[in-house]
Image: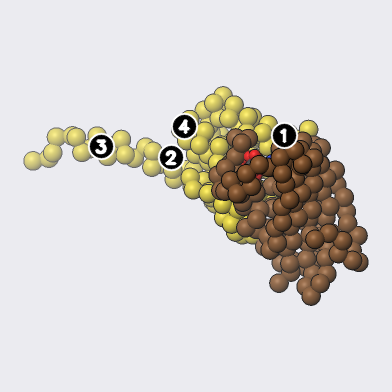
Chain colours: A yellow, B brown
């Protein structure tokens, strides 16, 4: 069975799917990714599907599951490179991609993730400022 | 139904998840030959993928025939057959979200939306036969 490699770039896990996935390979990837998110404390997951010419409900469900798992573990998932024909087909199939963030390419995805991290940090500072004694 | 003249069918047994990948490849090749648009190719390959997985998972395996058909327009016909348990309540099985296998329940209903023709012949204990067609526009 093929196994999709999971790369670590700082606190981001990067998966680039290069071949049409058999179902067992998809399940294996879902398991590998969940384990790696926990083991590495990654804050972001990028899944590059630009090489996939179809995404059916099985792979779609894997993407949604990874996104949900990362959210619980305080990480974020960004799916990269979804082809327009794939997006159109997924919608007609009835698969909801809500909750899945997408980006044009890996570079943009990294931007999305670092922005998300900045957002994570700013609110506590704001709150502190707000609760600080008001200046006379 | 079956037996459109002139085009030879490609037959693929479906007994493993690798076979589902092969079905996708066969359907893609036929869709290109039939000159379907990229979006329509994607739709029929996705539909075939959903149905072939059902053949494997629920039908206990079976076979798939893929052919290019030419009438007024060209198109792709995919026929799936299994000798599994069949489907008792077809209307229910065709409802979005209905699953007996912990899936999303979108395979059958979604596949039907993605193609131009969808025929299903199934009964408890008699297996399941499905034929789909996607025409070039
Ligand atoms: N070839 C088949 N033989 C017997 N039962 C089938 C067959 N295909 C589908 N079914 C039944 O119809 C139900 C709906 O199928 P459908 O493909 O829509 O959903 P699913 O396979 O359960 O989930 P999904 O495809 O979204 O992962 C299945 O759960 C199963 O009970
Ligand atoms: Mg299914």
**Chain ID at mark 4:** A
Q: For the residue labelled by badge 4, is the local secondary structure a helix, a strand or a loop? A: helix
Q: Secondary structure at mark 1?
A: helix
Q: Position of residue A129 (x, y in %)?
A: 22, 37
Query: Which residue lies under the disc numbered 3?
Result: A127
**Discs 1 and 2 share one subunit:** yes
Pointer 3 chain:
A
Task: From the top left corner, tell me how far across and down residue A98 is, in percent.
Answer: 49, 48
Q: Residue at x 51, y 46 (%)?
A: A100
Comes first in the chain, label 3 or label 1: 1
Quarter of the image with the N terminus of chain B is: bottom right
Looking at the image, is mark 1 or mark 2 nearer the viewer?
1
Residue depth check, mark 4 versus mark 3: number of the one nearer the observer: 4
- The residue at which mark 1 appears reads as A24
On screen, B16 above or below A108?
above
Residue A72 marker: 4
Residue that appears at 56% across and 48% down: B96
Of the numbered discs 2 and 4, the one sitting upstream in the chain is 4
Which of the two discs, 3 and 2, labels the residue nearer the N terminus? 2
**Separation of disc 2 and disc 4 at Cα?**
15 Å
Which mark identifies residue A104?
Answer: none
In front here: B42 or A20? B42
Query: As drawn, is B27 to the left or to the right of B115?
Result: right
Q: Are marks 4 and 3 in contact (CB under 8 Å)?
A: no
Q: Which residue is mark 2?
A: A117
Q: CA distance from mark 3 to mark 2?
A: 17 Å
Between disc 2 and disc 4, the foreground one is 4
Q: Is residue A72 visible?
A: yes
């Amino acid at each position: 069975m093929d196994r999709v490699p999971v790369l670590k770039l700082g606190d981001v896990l990067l998966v680039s799917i290069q071949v049409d996935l058999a179902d067992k390979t998809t399940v294996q990837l879902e398991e590998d990714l969940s384990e790696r998110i926990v083991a590495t404390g990654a804050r972001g997951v990028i899944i590059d599907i630009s090489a996939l010419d179809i995404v059916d409900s099985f792979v779609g469900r894997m993407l949604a599951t990874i996104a949900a798992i990362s959210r619980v573990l305080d990480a974020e998932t960004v799916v990269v490179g979804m082809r327009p024909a794939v997006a159109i087909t997924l919608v007609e199939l009835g698969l909801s991609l809500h909750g899945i963030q997408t980006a044009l390419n890996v570079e943009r995805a990294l931007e999305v993730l670092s922005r998300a991290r900045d957002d994570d940090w700013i609110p506590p500072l704001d709150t502190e400022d707000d609760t600080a004694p008001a200046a006379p | 139904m079956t037996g459109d003249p002139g085009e030879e069918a490609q037959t693929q047994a479906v007994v493993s998840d690798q076979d589902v990948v092969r079905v996708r490849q066969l359907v893609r090749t036929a869709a290109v030959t039939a000159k379907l648009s990229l979006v329509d190719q994607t739709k029929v390959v996705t539909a075939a993928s959903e149905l072939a997985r059902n053949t494997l998972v629920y039908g206990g395996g079976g076979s798939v025939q893929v052919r290019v058909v030419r009438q007024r327009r060209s198109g792709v016909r995919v026929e799936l057959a299994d000798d599994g348990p069949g489907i008792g309540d077809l209307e229910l099985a065709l409802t979005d979200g209905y699953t007996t296998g912990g899936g999303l329940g979108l395979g059958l209903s979604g596949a039907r939306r993605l193609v131009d023709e969808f025929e299903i012949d199934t009964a408890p204990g008699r297996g399941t036969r499905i034929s789909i067609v996607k025409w070039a526009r």
